[in-house]
Image (spheres, grey):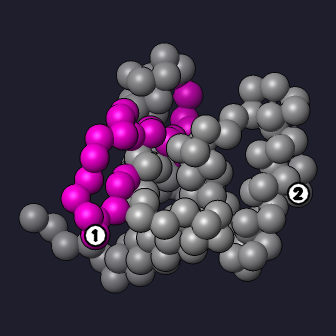
């Protein structure tokens, strides 16, 4: 098995820390998020397979399918957030997209204007608290 490069391992740690900080900011305890950085082609395949759309995504979020009981002292996974490896040279963008993906896991969406505004305001609030520059809308 190939070991990840130092830069990739550092990026993965930074993203995992950002996920923990996002959950903490939201007041969520006893939960976790799996974070992965995947190649562009893999992201496209996942989007086509699970969402039926054939395009290159920056972020994909897959919520945990059920709320089965977990043993005391362990965390329950909210789901998985995958980020596009092509953005690895832009860590601020990846951290923002991670916040975006976590909000999707929590049920936030941006299909309707009201939902989009609500989600964007919360993204800005979280990113500000974490010291992450959010894109200008």
Quick check: can you spot residue 89? no
Q: Where 17 falls versus 37 (above or below)?
A: below
Q: Secondary structure at mark 2?
A: loop
**Spot occupied by residue 31 in the image (x, y as percentages of width and height):** 43, 60
For marks 2 and 1 on the same chain, the one whose residue lies earlier in the sequence: 1
**Spot occupied by residue 101 in the image (x, y as percentages of width and height):** 57, 49
Quick check: can you spot residue 110? yes
Q: Residue furthest front?
A: 72
Q: Secondary structure at mark 1?
A: loop
Displayed quadrant of residue 114: top right
Q: Is residue 84 magenta?
A: no
**Spot occupied by residue 98 in the image (x, y as percentages of width and height):** 57, 57
For discs 2 and 1, the disc positioned in front in the rendered view: 1
Q: In the displayed structure, does residue 121 sit left or right of residue 127?
A: right
Q: Which residue is mark 2?
A: 136
Q: Residues under labels 2 and 1: Cα distance?
A: 40 Å
Q: Which residue is mark 1?
A: 73
Q: In the displayed structure, does residue 31 sit left or right of residue 128?
A: left
- The crowding category of the residue bearing disc 2, from other C-alpha atoms within 10 Å (few below 14, some 14 to 19, many at least 20), is few
Displayed quadrant of residue 46: top left
- The crowding category of the residue bearing disc 1, from other C-alpha atoms within 10 Å (few below 14, some 14 to 19, many at least 20), is few
**Spot occupied by residue 131 in the image (x, y as percentages of width and height):** 73, 79
The residue shown at (79%, 73%) is 128
Q: Is residue 61 magenta?
A: yes
Range drawn in magenta: 54-77
């Amino acid at each position: 098995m190939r070991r990840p490069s130092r830069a990739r391992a550092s990026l993965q740690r930074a993203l995992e820390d950002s996920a923990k900080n996002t959950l903490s900011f939201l007041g969520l305890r006893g939960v976790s998020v799996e974070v992965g950085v995947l190649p562009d082609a893999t992201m496209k395949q996942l989007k086509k397979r699970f969402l039926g759309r054939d395009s290159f995504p920056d972020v994909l979020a897959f919520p945990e399918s059920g709320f089965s009981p977990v043993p005391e002292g362990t965390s329950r996974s909210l789901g998985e957030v995958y980020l596009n490896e092509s953005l690895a040279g832009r860590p601020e963008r990846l951290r923002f997209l991670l916040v975006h993906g976590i909000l999707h896991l929590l049920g936030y969406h941006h299909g309707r204007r009201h939902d989009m505004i609500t989600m964007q305001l919360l993204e800005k609030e979280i990113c500000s608290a974490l010291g992450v520059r959010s894109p200008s809308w």
